[in-house]
């Protein structure tokens, strides 16, 4: 227990700087805005801040398209501001983890500008350049080198008029993929990472890092029914991915691994691979973000075609990940981030039971074994955006989805809007609601994305003033993890796997046990865990989201409880 890594009992808070706090009235959040709100993080008690990208960027994908890895975009401030933020967080005992986006750069990054300049450029091979498909003319439909679709709709290939060759972009055409087969690319990335560590940052959240190894030669993927093929089998945890991450660890982290945090964002990662990535003996990364649980409500038509969550599916998924990484490796735990809809709207009730469901969801998540992540506003019970017009959407994924659906002759605008309202990434990106003043205290100007109308009641000031609030509940969950080793390190056992309403599990470390219960519905639900837990055996309620203990056999709407024994 004593020699467990520090991050087993840490909680990470994600800041999406564009939407956090604006200090200069341009309607876009910035670093000085964050500096002005540190009290909020200190009171919450989080240990680490993960900062979404603030690097120089044309902002095609809100900073996930980087044109200079070693500078701050003027929209967010300066390198001096960032140094000040690092210092201020450290002074409060918090760490700062930077986003690391190295599967791709911006097409305006000097590396790509150089690579594109001619077929003979020294950096030509830093990206994935390919001629048209054999026997076809550049630009002809179907002439793309492979049939792969991009994550943001359309082909994953863009024709460069000048050289008449295509370059690969798994995301937008302004995000060309770096060629990690080239050792110069890897060395340049590692040098940049070392530069940041020398500046004082405490680690990296590595954007889509499991996509950097592509199987060569590149070839067509299966067509599942859409316009484009699915290339994911050739680039998800590709042939050299473990080699690359072990190399990165040696080159970047080896001098001070115990201080740092390395977390890999890994869409499509399997449990087997996640074990390998996070097994400390292999020295690759400390933990990964997996996507299974946030795909359970995707329908056959993809993420915008939603279906209701079945609680038993969630239990099966979390249960497998808890078991799979029990004796080696480590889980990241999250509901929300800047790419996901708000969990209180998605799996809870953002109306009548907003407080109850947000606190229940947080309780269930934080009591699993792994490191919990809180995304800005989640601790306030912020909801989806409630946009009803196409014009409100700004996210590139949503905009590309709208235009592709229209080009295909989609069924109805209402249906399209419905899918967006449920799943658009903009749901997570509306400005943080600080108080009941104009624009929720986010900015004195015009916010880049509309503030939700519910800010008059859902805001940080109101939450901090109410001891029962979502905010204070998060504060208590974080404190519990800090104080109680069973929360960080206890074994996990799922209970009631077939129950569609009540989520239940135990944690155990030595003589101490916890029982965690959560009602995933707005009705009273009976439960029976007598096989696993005796309530009369010195068991005490340590945390709940109702004012009194309630009945030992029924949960009230969206109720959560944590019991401890002995
Ligand atoms: O949100 C998604 C699409 O529905 C995910 O597939 C997402 O694109 C994927 O998790 C990768 O996300 C990361 O890389 C993207 C960036 O747009 C996301 O914001 C980032 O979190 C490209 O850099």
Image: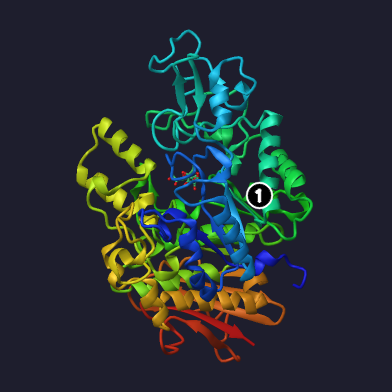
Q: Residue at the location (70% across, 49% down)?
A: 276
Residue 261 on image: x %, y %: 66, 57
Q: Is residue 194 left or right of residue 25?
A: right
The one of 395 and 488 positioned closer to us in this rendering: 395
Query: Compared to 101, does 443 lie above or below?
Result: below
Residue furthest to the top in view is 135
Q: Residue at the location (38% across, 17% down)?
A: 141
The one of 146 and 466 positioned closer to us in this rendering: 466
Residue 135 on image: x %, y %: 48, 7
Q: Is residue 79 left or right of residue 8?
A: left
Q: Is residue 495 visible?
A: no
Quadrant for the C terminus in the image: bottom right
Q: Residues within 10 Å of mark 1 (few under 14, many from 20)?
A: some
Quadrant for the N terminus in the image: bottom right
The one of 318 and 66 positioned closer to us in this rendering: 66
Q: Secondary structure at mark 1?
A: helix
Is the residue marked 1 within 8 Å of ligand 1, measured from its CB?
Answer: no
Residue 478 on image: x %, y %: 56, 74
Q: Is residue 272 left or right of residue 104?
A: right
Q: Is residue 190 visible?
A: yes
Q: Residue at the location (51% across, 59% down)?
A: 14
Q: Is residue 533 left or right of residue 243?
A: left
Q: How many marks?
A: 1
Query: Compared to 249, does 342 lie above or below?
Result: below
Q: To which residue does mark 1 refer? A: 196
Q: How is the image coloured?
A: rainbow
Query: Compared to 23, does 276 lie above or below?
Result: above
Residue 147 on image: x %, y %: 46, 24
Q: Quadrant of residue 523?
A: bottom left
Query: Compared to 245, does 352 lie above or below?
Result: below
């Amino acid at each position: 227990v004593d020699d467990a890594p520090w991050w087993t009992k840490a909680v990470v808070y994600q800041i999406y700087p564009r939407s956090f706090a604006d200090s200069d009235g341009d309607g876009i959040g910035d670093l000085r805005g964050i500096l002005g709100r540190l009290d909020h993080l200190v009171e919450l008690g989080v240990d680490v801040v993960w900062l979404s990208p603030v690097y120089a960027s044309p902002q095609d994908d809100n900073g996930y398209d980087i044109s200079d890895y070693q500078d701050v975009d003027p929209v967010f401030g300066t390198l001096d501001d960032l140094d000040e933020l690092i210092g201020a967080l450290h002074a409060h005992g918090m760490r700062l983890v930077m986003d690391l986006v190295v599967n791709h750069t911006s097409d305006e990054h000097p590396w790509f500008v150089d690579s594109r300049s001619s077929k003979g450029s020294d950096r030509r091979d830093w990206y994935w350049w390919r001629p048209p498909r054999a026997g076809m003319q550049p630009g002809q439909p179907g002439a793309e080198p492979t049939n792969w679709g991009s994550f943001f709709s359309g082909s994953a290939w863009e024709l460069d008029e000048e050289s008449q060759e295509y370059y690969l972009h798994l995301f937008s055409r302004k995000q060309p993929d770096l060629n990690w087969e080239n050792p110069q690319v890897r060395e340049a990335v590692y040098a940049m990472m070392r530069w940041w560590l020398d500046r004082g940052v405490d680690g990296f959240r590595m954007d889509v890092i499991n996509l950097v190894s592509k199987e060569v030669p590149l070839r067509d993927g299966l067509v599942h029914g859409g316009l484009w093929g699915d290339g994911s089998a050739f680039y998800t945890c590709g042939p050299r991915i473990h080699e690359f991450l072990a190399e990165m660890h040696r080159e970047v982290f080896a001098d001070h691994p115990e201080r740092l945090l390395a977390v890999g964002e890994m869409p499509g990662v399997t449990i087997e691979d996640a074990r390998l990535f996070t097994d400390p003996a292999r020295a690759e990364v400390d933990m990964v973000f997996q996507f299974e649980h946030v795909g359970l409500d995707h329908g056959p038509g993809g993420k915008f075609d939603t279906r209701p969550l079945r609680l038993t599916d969630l239990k099966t998924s979390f249960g497998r990940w808890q078991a799979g990484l029990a004796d080696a490796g480590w889980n990241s735990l999250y509901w929300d981030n800047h790419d996901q809809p708000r969990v209180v709207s998605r799996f809870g009730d953002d109306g009548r039971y907003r407080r109850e469901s947000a606190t229940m969801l947080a309780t269930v998540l934080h009591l699993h074994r792994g490191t919990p992540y809180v995304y800005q506003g989640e601790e306030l019970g912020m909801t989806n955006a409630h946009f009803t017009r196409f014009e409100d959407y700004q996210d590139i994924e949503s905009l590309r989805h709208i235009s592709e659906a229209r080009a295909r002759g989609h069924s109805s605008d209402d249906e399209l809007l419905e899918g967006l309202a449920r799943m658009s990434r903009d749901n997570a990106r509306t400005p943080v609601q600080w108080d009941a003043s104009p624009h929720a205290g986010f900015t004195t100007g015009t916010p880049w994305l509309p503030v939700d109308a519910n800010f008059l009641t859902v805001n940080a000031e109101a939450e901090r003033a109410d001891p029962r609030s979502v905010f204070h509940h998060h504060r208590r969950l974080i404190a519990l993890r800090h104080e109680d080793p069973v929360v960080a390190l206890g074994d996990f056992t799922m209970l009631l796997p077939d129950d569609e309403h009540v989520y239940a599990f135990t944690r155990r470390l030595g003589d101490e046990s916890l029982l965690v219960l959560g009602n995933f519905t707005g009705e009273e639900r009976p439960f029976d865990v007598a096989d696993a837990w005796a309530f009369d055996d010195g068991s005490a309620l340590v945390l709940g989201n109702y004012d009194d203990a309630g009945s030992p056999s029924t949960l009230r709407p969206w109720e959560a409880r944590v019991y401890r024994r002995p």
